[in-house]
Amino acid sequence: MGMNFADMAKGAESAEESEDLQRFTPPDGLALDVEVVFVKHGPTNSGNGYGWGTFMKVLEGEYQGMAFWDNTYLTDGNDFGNKRGMAKLAIGGVPYEIWPSNPDVKAVAELLKGSQFTVMTGSRVDDKGRKNDDGTPKVWADHKWRPLSGQTFETKAPVNQMQEGPPSPARPPADGDEGLPWEN
């Protein structure tokens, strides 16, 4: 039985994820200040796009030191989803201006590592009717990213692509909040 260095390299890369952090699924409705500690990337299952999985460590509060995953996808033919995805990645340190150069997915992952922002936690029921093994509907994370309180956020994205001006408050949305343009 020979050694497979490619498999070993994958394992070593994945080991970086733990950093002695306890993984958890955050409840909906929280505002968590986080730092991206690890990024996985690759093509979507359908093969028509790419995704970045960000493993994020909570920086303060009740969940300090715990970590969770969030995924962001860009896919062919999904203009609205791509607008949301690019806006989310911009908050994570990937400037909109990089996309016209058709960047390597690994380069995007490198830009995300170490970035800090606020995650507004949320979830949604699978809209395609997929079920868990026990027959219950699949529920997916549906987190929103916001600049940290006091951070400035600027972009040269096309009109209606991103909100310019002062950052959104790092707090759960209140009744009557309109949200950001890419969330409506």
Image: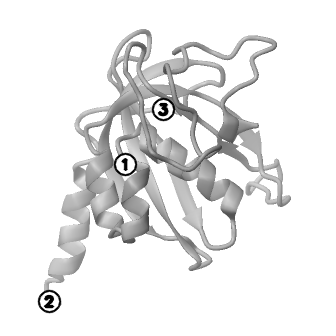
Q: Secondary structure at mark 3?
A: loop
Q: Position of residue 71 (x, y in %)?
A: 52, 50
In this orientation, does residue 35 appear? no
Which quadrant would residue 35 be assigned to in this image? Answer: top left
Q: Toward the viewer: 115 or 97? A: 97
Gap between marks 1 and 3 measured at Cα: 26 Å
Q: Which residue is mark 2?
A: 2
| Residue 126 appears left or right of 122 | right
Q: Position of residue 58 (x, y in %)?
A: 38, 24
Question: Pointer 2: residues within 10 angstroms few (<14), some, or many (20+)?
Answer: few
Quadrant into which the N terminus falls: bottom left
Q: CB under 8 Å between callouts 1 and 2?
A: no
Q: Amino acid at mark 1?
A: Val
Q: Amino acid at mark 3?
A: Phe
Residue 129 vertical position relative to residue 70 in the rendered view, above or below:
below
Q: Which residue is mark 3?
A: 24
Gap between marks 1 and 2 measured at Cα: 40 Å
| Residue 55 appears left or right of 73 | left
Q: Secondary structure at mark 2?
A: loop
Gap between marks 2 and 3 measured at Cα: 36 Å
Question: Pointer 1: residues within 10 angstroms few (<14), some, or many (20+)?
Answer: many
Residue 30 vertical position relative to residue 142 in the rendered view, above or below:
above
Q: Which residue is mark 1?
A: 94
Earlier-in-chain disc, 1 versus 2: 2
